[in-house]
Amino acid sequence: MALDKAAVRTIAFLARIKVPEEDLEHLAGEMSNILGWVEQLGEVDTSGVEPMTSGAETTLPQREDSVTDGDARDQVLANAPQPEDGFYAVPKVLE
Amino acid sequence: MTAALTDLTLAEARDGLQAGSFSSVELTRAHSAAVERARSLNAFITETPDLALGLAEASDARRRRGGAAGPMDGIPIAVKDLFCTEGVSTTAGSHILDGFTPTYDSTVTANLKGAGAVMLGKTNMDEFAMGSANMTSYYGPVKNPWKGGDGRDLVPGGSSGGSTAAVAARLCLGAIGTDTGGSIRQPASFCGVVGLKPTYGRCSRWGIVAFASSLDQAGPMARTVRDAAVMLGAMAGHDARDSTSAPVDVPDFEAALSAGVGGLKVGIPKEYVVDGMAAEIGRLWEKGAAWLKESGAEIVEVSLPHTRHALPAYYIVAPAEASSNLARYDGVRYGLRVAGGSLDEMYENTRGAGFGAEVRRRVLIGTYVLSAGYYDAYYLKAQKVRTLIAEDFRRAFETVDVLLTPTAPSAAFAIGEKMDDPIAMYLNDVFTVPASLAGLPAISVPAGLSAGGLPLGLQLIGRPFDEETVLGAAHALEAAAGFDARPPPVGEA
């Protein structure tokens, strides 16, 4: 799959990463190479094969549906770059 | 005296502390001084000598009262800067975590702290553990303490390159790292140290900055197999806070060493002969098989037919999981924030400035292979191939107890090489990625020197949660190889 500049621009927006216009061409080439390389998996017959979704054959444990953590607002906010009045703050979303 | 203390193995230091031959404070001071002298390696992002001294004093006080916590009590170690450490900056080698100081410890570092281990500092690494040469760190490359014949600076491998460089240069008695596709084993091979990736689920991932959650696993790096076994015992254990942490007992790994390889069947997977592998790697591999045979093992050729598909499958699965995990770096909750006119713009500016080139590339690839219309063709396909790779191993382990392979296709290369071609860099992990995909325990043991005088490792892979057999075989391999070469001293010129 060869990606062009426009495709990389779209992917970069989906990933919310600002990519300078002058990097797009080069990145499109690199990503196309990588995708071309991984596409060799197409030759593997995987019909009837279940996908492996975890690194281990374990069933997820279950526990009582109860609060086990919390009440740590100051700890949670301790690393926020711009907290305000005990909250995370973001640029205005609603007009 | 100082030089002697940094030359000890971890097990020797443990015995010396127990015998009262020296104190943890003396041991820690010697290592902190070594860390300071070796700054030219750039192995550490954050040094914590004062913190270390406090922990060492507490350890000595415990020992005086007769209440030493166990074999790791008072032992100075280094911690990859991917583990959250309470009150100590944690960067993951990335600009985007600027200023991040966790308010809690990861389970693994908490376990080690509980066992009395003394943290000397946080080691340099590839950004978010994405790299095989320690070239992608925001904090600059790490130098391998081993030097090329022409005196050129070499990479230590990656992503846990700071940890292996520190162990090889005798700045610490052991170090912890993480391995997603080879990030413990490949740098161990490049630096001439032992590196063990345990079974997926053996060590809790809680509090480790996540890269690819179905693959990430913490493990020890040390100068001997015994040292790695002692460290793993203090790191491992079930943790309810990680739903993939296995509820299995932690055996006495050190006791397993004496089992050796007598009576074991050792598999040689024929598909691990790959194009472009240095001939000397093949010869060392044959030598390794001969050593294990002389030590009492039976050598059996086995087939893992899907081996060559492991690397491309990995480079879909790992970036996909990374793109999802790294979505949390949003400029809101921790780390860097770069202003923008709107919320989206703030996200884009923050992530554009905060991620380096390799991380950006992988997040974009991951975003693409997970996007609507491409998910089945890439991500689902790779997950199915992963099933086939795991089945290959399962079948092989019906007839053999452990597999022997090379760790990496070459010795350490010069800083700056392979940087123009991401795929050439990815090929470093060709022998380590399959066991990662299958979640199996695997260890790299230094086994010889290249023609250029650089260390080369051999890898042993075992059944899930059978680290004991892997360690026993590794101990036998280590004894037969008798690797005693060491890098030139750092910072004493």
Image: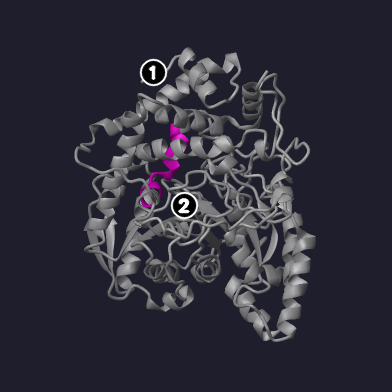
Magenta stretch bounds: B423-435
Front position in the image: B390 or B431: B390
Q: Give residue B328's mark.
A: none
Q: Compare residues B375 and B220 and report the one nearer the observer.
A: B375
Percent x, y for residue B46?
A: 72, 51
Residue B450 disc label: 2
Q: Is residue B434 magenta?
A: yes
Left or right of residue B115: residue B408: left
Residue B399 in sight: yes
In the displayed structure image, the side of residue B209 where residue B371 appears, left or right: left
The subunit carrying tag 1 is A
On residue A2, which mark appears? Answer: 1
Spot occupied by residue B198 in the image (x, y as percentages of width and height): 45, 60
Where B216 sits versus B463, above or below?
above
Q: Quadrant of the C terminus of chain B?
A: bottom right
Q: Is residue B150 magenta?
A: no
Q: Which subunit holds the residue at mark 2?
A: B
x and y, in percent, of residue B103 in the image: 70, 53
Name which residue lies at 65% across and 32% down: B354
Between tags 2 and 1, which lies in front?
1
> What amino acid type is highlighted by mark number 2?
Ser
- Above or below, B89 against B263 in this view is above
Which residue is found at the position 72% from the left and 80% from the top?
B62
Give the secondary structure at mark 1.
loop
